[in-house]
Image: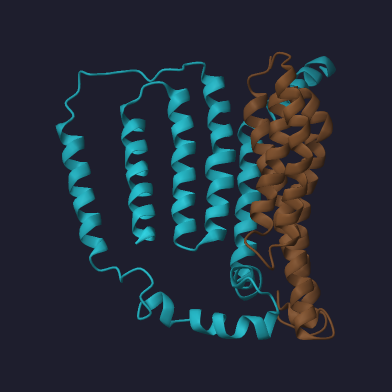
Chain colours: A brown, B cyan
Amino acid sequence: MTHNLILHVVSKTLIPLIIVFALYVQFHGDFGPGGGFQAGVIMSSAIILYALVFGLDVAEQVMPPTILRLLASLGVLIYAGVGVVTLFPGGNYLDYSVLADTQIAGQHLGILLVELGVGITVFSVMLIIFFAFAGRGRP
Amino acid sequence: MIDVFIDVTLLAFLAITAVAIVRMTNLFAIVMLFGIFSFLSAAMFVVMDAVDVAFTEAAVGAGISTVLMLATIALTKDQNEKQSRSHRSWLPLAVVIVTGAALVYGTLDIPAFGDPEAPAQMYVAPYYLERSIAETGVPNVVTAVLASYRGFDTLGEVVVVFTAGIAVLLLIGGKRQKSNTRKNEKKRK
């Protein structure tokens, strides 16, 4: 996109707010609407806005595609890994109650970790898809 | 009373947007209207107290998919839909009317909105609503069901998202790298 002062200034103000909101949605999902999926999408929209305003190459420097691929698998690994960890104290797969001393604390920890995995995977997959589509137009 | 008014207004806007999408030929404007359609659906979900679904609809339907469709339009470089007036539109119209009538007939069997006797409210929902605070300590029942009671399902969904990313990478992501390696192979030969 050609140099546009208003877009640059507005998006530079908006992007930190979008990221903070994404983190709020991520970690407040237990108490209000939201969760990992929505947070991942909002977080990726911050980077997509950056890419639209400042150009794809700069955005790929901020979020290198190799790191995105690692993050996409890391999220699934965290989710599936929490399930494996719950097997060791004798629980069922993805039964978070055995993660901590009390059932409530275990459930809380498990849900937090699992939502984090969802958020990371959704964030990176959305960006992978966007970069793949938008990158096709480049020479 | 105010609920009915909001419902009717939103539904009317949804219908107007849908008709506008059908009648337009500029793909850019159509994509923008798709975004508006998604936002209106999200507002409908809010009215129906499904805030989590509304959140997802607004973020994915209006945000990400609009950007992806715009990126696709930018790739195809053809802003206008090809108009072909030669074919007769009676058969599609008949198909649409019959399908629509079948759907409307199907809704007659659906229990009323918020009906406590509905099958959805009778099966596991009461258990979740009564026990989720005691068992998980999470005030948002949707999160408790999604991440804890239905943890397996959500794991599957995450794997689906992951698979979609891999599929896109395989199909259109690694093009440039492949041509580079081919060049390298040629150089080695």
- At x 82% / y 83%, what residue is drawn? A89
Q: Quadrant of the N terminus of chain B?
A: bottom left
Q: Is residue A104 visible?
A: yes
- Up the image or down, B65 lies above or below B189; here it is below
Q: Nearer the viewer, residue A41 or A69?
A: A41
Find residue B33 and report its image quarter.
top left
- At x 72% / y 69%, what residue is drawn? A111
Locate residue A7, reporting x and y percent.
70, 23
Q: Nearer the viewer, residue B42 or B87?
A: B42
Q: Is residue A54 left or right of residue B4?
A: right
Find residue A101 and report its image quarter.
bottom right
Q: How many marks?
A: 0
- At x 67% / y 84%, what residue is drawn? B135
- At x 56% / y 85%, what residue is drawn? B130
Q: Is residue B173 visible?
A: no
Q: Nearer the viewer, residue B7 or A26?
A: B7
- Up the image or down, B125 lies above or below B50; here it is below
Q: Is residue B46 left or right of residue A87?
A: left
Locate residue A30, reporting x and y percent.
69, 68
Locate residue B97, reporting x and y percent.
18, 44
Locate residue A119, reporting x and y percent.
71, 54
- Up the image or down, B82 lies above or below B139; here it is above
Q: Quadrant of the C terminus of chain B?
A: top right
